[in-house]
Image: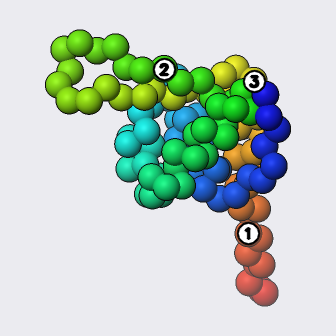
Amino acid sequence: MEPLQRIGKATVDVLEVLLGTDEPRWGLEIIKLTGRPSGSVYPLLDRLERAGWVTSSWDDDAERRGPRRRMYRLTPEGAAEARRVVARAAPAPRLVPRAAQ
């Protein structure tokens, strides 16, 4: 396992998508849901897999037409780390001052 060196907004976006379901997601689905380009998402998924946060496998749906899809899902440890990262990245609530009475 390799530790993650840097966690940017694109990483947070990918982690949020993966946290959004217990089902595995395929790469193009993650790209569409994050709005990030494939040149960002696939290297991120690779880094997350090398760090042990994500596992991947080839889709084995023989009924589906088209090329096989690579499916990604968070590991239990990765899900715990992802929740911490996403919570840290969440914007702080803005305090709105009360109007003077």
Q: Does label 1 or label 3 sit earlier along the sequence? A: 3
Q: Which residue is mark 1?
A: 94
Element on which disc 2 rests: strand
In this rendering, would 40 be left or right of 99?
left
**Percent x, y of residue 38:** 45, 52
Q: Which mark is residue 52?
A: none
Element on which disc 1 rests: loop
Q: Amino acid at mark 3?
A: Glu
Identify whether 51 is placed above or below 33: above
**Percent x, y of residue 84:** 78, 40
Q: Quadrant of residue 14?
A: top right
Q: Which residue is mark 3?
A: 77
In this rendering, would 45 be left or right of 57?
right
Q: Does label 2 or label 3 sit earlier along the sequence? A: 2
Quadrant in which the N terminus appears = top right
Q: Amino acid at mark 1?
A: Arg
Q: Which residue is mark 2?
A: 57
**Percent x, y of residue 89:** 73, 55
Q: Quadrant of residue 3?
A: top right
Look at the image and tell me whether residue 23 can be seen: no
